[in-house]
Image (cartoon, rainbow, N blue to C red):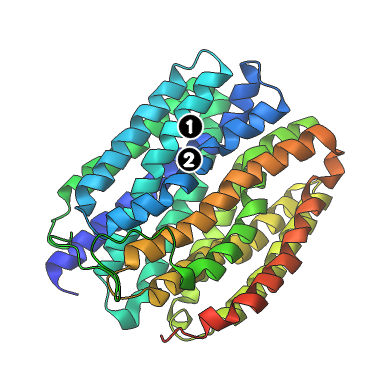
Amino acid sequence: MRGDRRRDFRLLLAASLFYLAGPMALAPLVAGFAGALGAGAALMGVAGGAMNGVSLLSRPLVGNLADRVDKRRLTIGGALTMTVAALLCVAAPAPWAVVAARVLHGLGYACCSVCLSTWLADLLPRNRTASGMGLYGMMTALGMAVGPALGVYCYQWFGYRPAFALGAALTAAVALLAWRVRNADAPRRFHPPTGLAPHHLRLLEPRVVPVALIMTLFTLPFTATQAFLVTLTEREGLALPVGLFFPLYAAVVLALRLSLRRFLDTVPFGVFMAASAICAAGSLLALTAMRGFWLMAAAACLMAGGYGLMCTVCQSTAILLARPGGRGLANGTYYVGIDLGMALGPLAGGFLLAHAPLTWFYPAFLATIPAILVVYALGRGALATLRR
């Protein structure tokens, strides 16, 4: 990789950290903040999942745009939109305002996630795609862990609204970093994927759909935990340092991605999926039995081996499955899976919180494990087209 590309790659890695840390700083607080403003359990779940619901609906459009327009402008626009949304949360007078702000957050999040990952992938040679995207995955995992931890600690020390202001500052940094990236790798002329006319608009990349669905199932329990871990521990009267859960998760994700980096380009998808499914099940069982720090730590570490590792494996697989000229759409399809899980996870968690005993919360999500195996079995034909 040339020196100028190396510089751009590093700037985009830093932007990837902040783009996820910003909205994730709000994620464990939004449901509770809506409740503090008067929302019931169902509306708390809607507030927690609104961002990803909107992001899910806008993914197909953003995925197509990422292959056609200037990625720097789209990234900066998305980052500034998220900044405004976080500031609207700071000023929110009622639950409806929190939901509205998170809707706006979803639009900016969709733009940044697809554009940054596609932009980074365009800088990598094909034989280094998985390992290079592993670095991107490490930064997003760090952002996904550091963001909630910063948000929780800021809330505990200063309250909800200062924590939302911190989220706004983090996403503003994304716009600054993207502005400093040279624009040489943004497409100047759209070259449609093989076999498609320039005006053809596709909503999803069919080859990537099985990978996206697998990612949805891994995401469901993660985002339900993210949205309700603080609330559940408070309701159960557990004196646990829950602010450490996501930093522990991030540390293990970083260690896994560094140690497994060379294997990401060679080991079959199914091997990683089976190992991650076992880790995901173990994490849910540890959360069910959690009464002290060590079980909480075990749950965080196992969740890193489940959801955390599969984020990188699924995204690099999606990029490798893309047709020529269609990486943005393939990336968008992958993120549709993420968004679907992130939108449905808090909604399912809110439903369980309102209608089921607290002890059923985590065991209910064990149903995702056999569903993962079924989707993999049905989608092996698409994955068989992969050539690393």
Figure label count: 2
Mark yes or no: residue 158 visible.
no
Asked whether, in this view, residue 281 is left or right of residue 83, the answer is right
Which circle marks residue 102 in the picture?
A: 1
**Contact (Cβ within 8 Å) of mark 1 with mark 2:** yes
Query: Residue 272 at what x, y percent from top left?
Result: 59, 77
User: CA gap, disc 1 to disc 2?
Assistant: 8 Å
Q: Secondary structure at mark 2?
A: helix
Residue at 59 percent across and 76 percent down: it is 379
Q: Quadrant of the N terminus?
A: bottom left
At horizontal 46% and vertical 33% (from top left) the residue drawn is 103
The residue at 65%/34% (across/down) is 45
Q: Dividing the picture into quarters, in which one does residue 286 lie?
A: bottom right
Picture disc at residue 224: none
Image height of 106 relative to 267, above or below: above
Q: Residues within 10 Å of mark 2 (few under 14, many from 20)?
A: many
Q: Position of residue 289 (x, y in %)?
A: 83, 51
Disc 1 on helix, strand or loop?
A: helix
Q: In which quadrant will I find the C terminus?
A: bottom left
Q: Would you say 145 lies left or right of 187 here?
A: right
Image position of 124 (left or right of 96): left
Query: Extreme top residue here?
Result: 93
Amino acid type, label 1: Arg
Residue in the image at 56% along x and 70% along y: 210
Relative side of 222 to 178, left or right:
right
Which residue is nearer to you in this view: 312 or 385?
Answer: 385
Closer to the observer: label 1 or label 2?
2
Q: Position of residue 329 (x, y in %)?
A: 37, 62
Q: Is residue 44 visible?
A: yes
Q: Which residue is mark 2?
A: 54
The three-letter amino acid code for the residue at tag 2 is: Val
Residue 324 screen position, x and y as percent: 29, 75
